[in-house]
Amino acid sequence: MRNDYLITENPLKALLYFALPMIIGNFFQQTYTMADSAIVGRYVGEQALAAVGASYAFTNIFIWIAIGGGIGASVKVSRYFGAGQFQKMKEALYTALLAFLLLSLALGGIGLWFSLDIMKLLDTPANVLGLADMYLRVYFLGLPFLFMYSVLSAMFNALGKSRIPLFFLIFSSLFNVVLDWVLVTRYGLGVAGVAWASPGYSGTCLPKGPASSPQKNCCPWPGLPCLPSSSSPRSPSA
C-alpha cells in the first residue's frame, strides 16, 4: 500500500490496516510475559516467580515512560512528514533518539545504584528481596535498548509503517521465549536468566555459561551477584 494510504484510502480500511499490526504486537507482548512467568514458576520456583512479579510493577513505570516519550516525539515527526519537511523530520528523529538514549542511561544508572533500596521501599518480602534486586539490576543494564526500541517503533508508526515494528516484535518475542528456556533450564541462571533474555541481551550469557564458569549458579556478567542455591533450576513436577 502507498505511503499516504492514511489520507487517500477509505478511513475504515486505512485505520484497520494501520492499527491491526499494533493490536497483534500487543498480543505477542502479552504472550511473552505469560511464557516468562510460566518458565520461571515451573523450572525455578515460587520465590523466583514472586521476585519477578514484585519487580514488574516498578519496571512498568519505565516501559510507559519509554512508550509515552516515543509517542510524544512521533507527533513532531509525523507532522513534518505530512508537511513534506523531511529535513526537519530527520532533525526531530535524531533529537528524540539522542535525548531518550541519554535519559535511559541516566535512569539505568540510578536504578542500578538504588535498586535494592527501591525494592525495600516497595515492601518486597525479605525472602524474595535478593532475587528481585538481581532481576532489577540486569533489567536496568538493558534499559537503553528498551527506550531505543520504543522510540523507533513510535517513529515507524508515525510514518504509517506499523508493520515494521510488528515483524521485529514477533521475532523478538519468539526468540526471547526460547532464550528464556535455555538460560533458565540449561544454563541455570534462574531469575537472572529471565532478565538476560530480555531484548538487547541476545547471547550475552551464552559464551560464558556453566561449562566455562567455576560457579554454576552465577550469572556470568561482572559485578552481578550469584544466585542462591535455592534458586537453581528444578525438574518440573509431574
Image (spheres, grey):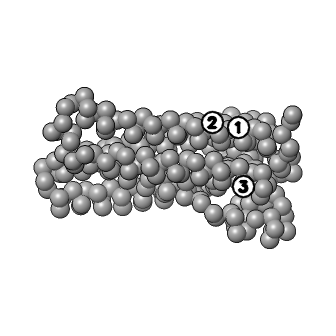
Q: What residue is pinned by disc 2?
A: 34
Numbered circle sitting on residue 38: 1
Please indicate whether residue 181 sits to the left or right of residue 228 in the image: left
Disc 3 marks a residue whose amino acid type is Leu
Could you classify mark 2 by the number of other residues whose Cα lies within 10 Å: few (under 14), some (14-19), or many (20 or more)? Answer: few
Contact between labelled residues 1 and 2, with CB atoms less than 8 Å apart: yes
Please indicate whether residue 196 sits to the left or right of residue 108 in the image: right
In 3D space, how far apart are the residues under numbered discs 1 and 3 (Cα atoms)?
14 Å
Residue 103 visible in the shown view:
no
Towards the viewer: 210 or 59: 210
Q: Secondary structure at mark 2?
A: helix
Could you classify mark 1 by the number of other residues whose Cα lies within 10 Å: few (under 14), some (14-19), or many (20 or more)? Answer: some
Specify the quadrant of the image occupied by residue 43.
Answer: top right
Numbered circle sitting on residue 183: 3
Numbered circle sitting on residue 184: none
Q: What residue appears at the point 49 percent right and 57 percent down from the top-left corner?
A: 144
Could you classify mark 3 by the number of other residues whose Cα lies within 10 Å: few (under 14), some (14-19), or many (20 or more)? Answer: many
